[in-house]
Image: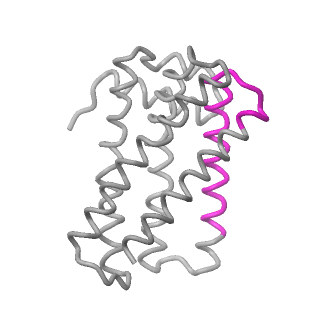
Amino acid sequence: MPLSQDTTSALYGAYRLARADAGGMAYFDTSVDGFWRSFIAAALVAPLFALFLAIRFNTGEMEITPFRFAAVETIAYVIAWLIFPLIMFHVAQAIEREQEFIGYIVAYNWASVWQNLVYLPFVILSELGLLSAGAGRAMGMLVLVMVMLYTWFITKTALRVTGVLATGLVILDFVVSIILNALTESMVR
C-alpha cells in the first residue's frame, strides 16, 4: 500500500520532531481534515499491533476464547486512540490552547507511528522470550523514557506550553494508558 504524500509528509514531520527539531511541525496538515486524517496512523500501527496480540495470545496462559480476546483488545485499541484526544480537548480549553489543539493531536498521532515502530518489536521479542528478564526490563525502561521524552517535546512544541506543564500532560497521558491497560488486562485474564 503506497503512502499518500500527506501521510509521507506527516511521518517526516514526526521524524523531525523525534530529532528534537520543532520545524517538524511545518510538515503536518493542521486543518480539521488533517486532524481526522491523522487517525490513519492507527491503521498504520494496527498490523504490527495485531501481530503482537497474536503472539501474546499464543504464548500466554489465556483462559478466554480467541474471539473474546480479539474483541476486547480491538475495542481497547480504538479507545486508546480516542480517549487521550478527548481528554486533551477539554484540557486545551482549560489551559487556553484551543488554537493549538488540532496541531498537537495531529503531531501526537503521527508520532505514535514511530513510537510503536520502536516499542512493538521490543515487546514482541520479549513476548517470544528472546530477551532475558533483566535485558527486557532495562530495554523496556529505556524505550519508555525515549517515548516519554519524545511526547514531552511534541507537547511542549505543539501546544506552546512550558516544560513543567508539558511534563504534567505527559504524565496524564501515561496514567490514562496505565488505567486503560489495567482495565483491558482485567477483561482478558
Q: Position of residue 25 (x, y in %)?
A: 55, 21
Q: Which residues are magenta?
A: 138-166
Q: What secondary structure do most residues of the magenta stretch adopt?
A: helix
Q: Position of residue 71 (x, y in %)?
A: 26, 62
Total marks shown come to: 0
Picture quadrant where residue 164 is located: top right
Please give the name of the residue rendered at 50% of the width and 53% of the height, measured from the top-left corner: 118
Please give the name of the residue rendered at 49% of the width and 73% of the height, measured from the top-left corner: 126
Query: Which of 128 and 88 lies nearest the eye of the viewer?
Result: 88
Q: Image height check: is 100 above or below 46?
A: above
Question: Magenta segment: does it hold 140?
Answer: yes
Q: Going by the image, does 150 lie left or right of 189?
A: right
Picture quadrant where residue 3 is located: top left
Please give the name of the residue rendered at 56% of the width and 14% of the height, measured from the top-left corner: 99
Question: Magenta segment: does it hold 103?
Answer: no
Image quarter in which the C terminus is found? bottom left
Q: Image height check: is 174 above or below 58?
A: above
Q: Position of residue 103 (x, y in %)?
A: 51, 21
Q: How is the image coloured?
A: one colour
Q: Going by the image, does 140 lie left or right of 82?
A: right
Please give the name of the residue rendered at 46% of the width and 43% of the height, measured from the top-left corner: 83
Query: Which of 156 and 137 lies nearest the eye of the viewer?
Result: 156
Q: Position of residue 28 (x, y in %)?
A: 46, 20
Image quarter in which the N terminus is found? top left
Query: Which of 157 and 22 lies nearest the eye of the viewer?
Result: 157
